[in-house]
């Protein structure tokens, strides 16, 4: 009876043991802010940018909070561990290779964690660089940032109007309504979600996030897009975008079900 009771207890503990997920953010500490200027024959780029350094690991913390909400939604009984990986200045300056270098930096940090044998999955987020200028945004845009478009994007006849009726681009006003506008400000989130096997650090799945939202306020008296909205409003919209995009991306990965890893070789860097 004692042996039987012990076995039942062990089976019960094994049945109800929560899977542990290691959530890892390697997003860096830079918040790029850019805009477009008129070309005047200069060789200087017409998309000047400046990188604002975010103190207190704020970017990684936002990414981790979003990963946590996404994994918790799928696996509410799971146990979650939170890790951040710092990216060097040189890695963040090499924007064309930021995805690969951030990934490799995170892998090196994870190799030094002997406790990963107790983890079920590693969920890693790194920045991605979008090389081309698409959807009205600047080229070479990565991570979390903000793009302001102060140049008219509609028919020249509509450029002096507060609200473009026929041309321009689709934006949201402060009430969340979709309108057309010739100017906008756009918080964006360009990242990659990696699902890793903790033992081998093999990539099991990945999802790329390329999301942004354009905003303008036709009731504003300012033509300077950086003055149309308060930093608090834009920060709130960015947080919403990151959380929603992360939840959608994680929901498309193999975390929906369990995948058996048959060959656990050494991890290879992304191509």
Image (tube, grey):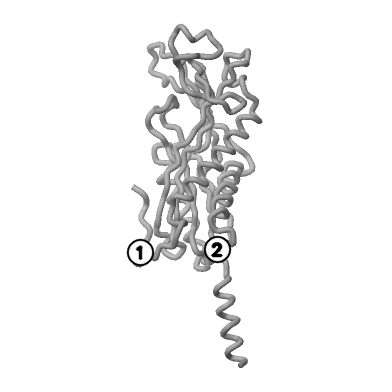
Label 2 to label 1: alpha-carbon separation: 22 Å
Task: Count residues near mark 2 (Cα–Cα under 10 Å), then give few for <14, some for 14-19, many for 20+.
Answer: some
Whole-percent x and y of residue 10? 57, 80
Residue appearing at x 39%, y 37% in the figure: 96
Q: How many marks?
A: 2
On screen, residue 136 above or below 153: below
Relative to the observer, which residue lies in front, 41 or 240? Answer: 240
The image quarter in which residue 227 lies: top right
Residue appearing at x 52%, y 37% in the figure: 144
Whole-percent x and y of residue 85? 53, 50
On screen, residue 54 above or below 76: above
Side of 246 relative to 95 (left or right): right
The image quarter in which residue 132 lies: top left
Q: Which mark is residue 265?
A: 1
- Is residue 50 visible in this depiction of the protein? no
Relative to the observer, which residue lies in front, 99 or 250? Answer: 250
Give the mark, 2 or 1, whose residue is nearer the N terminus: 2
Side of 42 relative to 146 (left or right): left
Q: Which mark is residue 78?
A: none
On screen, residue 174 above or below 256: above
Q: Secondary structure at mark 2?
A: strand
Residue appearing at x 46%, y 62% in the figure: 198
Whole-percent x and y of residue 123? 49, 54
The image quarter in which residue 225 lies: top right
Q: Secondary structure at mark 1?
A: loop
Task: Count residues near mark 1 (Cα–Cα under 10 Å), then give few for <14, some for 14-19, many for 20+.
Answer: few
Q: Which mark is residue 20?
A: 2
Instruction: Spot the residue most to the bottom.
Output: 1
């Amino acid at each position: 009876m004692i042996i039987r009771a012990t076995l039942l207890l062990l089976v019960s503990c094994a049945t109800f043991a929560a899977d542990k997920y290691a959530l890892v953010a390697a997003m860096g500490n830079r918040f790029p802010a850019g805009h477009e200027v008129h070309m005047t024959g200069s060789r200087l780029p017409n998309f000047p940018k400046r990188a604002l350094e975010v103190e207190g690991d704020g970017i990684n913390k936002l990414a981790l909070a979003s990963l946590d909400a996404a994994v918790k939604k799928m696996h509410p009984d799971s146990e979650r561990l939170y890790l951040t990986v710092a990216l060097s200045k040189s890695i963040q300056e090499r924007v064309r290779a930021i995805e690969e270098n951030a990934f490799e930096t995170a892998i090196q940090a994870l190799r030094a964690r002997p406790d990963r044998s107790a983890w079920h999955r590693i969920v890693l987020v790194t920045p991605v660089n979008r090389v081309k200028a698409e959807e009205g945004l600047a080229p070479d845009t990565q991570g979390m940032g903000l793009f302001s478009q102060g140049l008219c994007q509609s028919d020249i006849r509509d450029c002096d109007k507060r609200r473009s009726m026929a041309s321009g681009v689709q934006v949201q006003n402060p009430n969340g309504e979709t309108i057309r506008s010739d100017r906008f400000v756009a918080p964006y989130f360009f990242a990659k979600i990696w699902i890793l096997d903790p033992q081998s650090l093999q990539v099991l799945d990945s999802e790329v996030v390329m999301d942004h939202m354009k905003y303008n306020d036709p009731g504003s008296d300012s033509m300077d897009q950086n003055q149309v909205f308060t930093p608090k409003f834009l920060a709130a919209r960015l947080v919403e975008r990151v959380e929603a995009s992360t939840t959608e991306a994680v929901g498309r990965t193999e975390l929906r079900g369990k995948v058996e890893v048959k060959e656990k070789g050494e991890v290879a860097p992304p191509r």
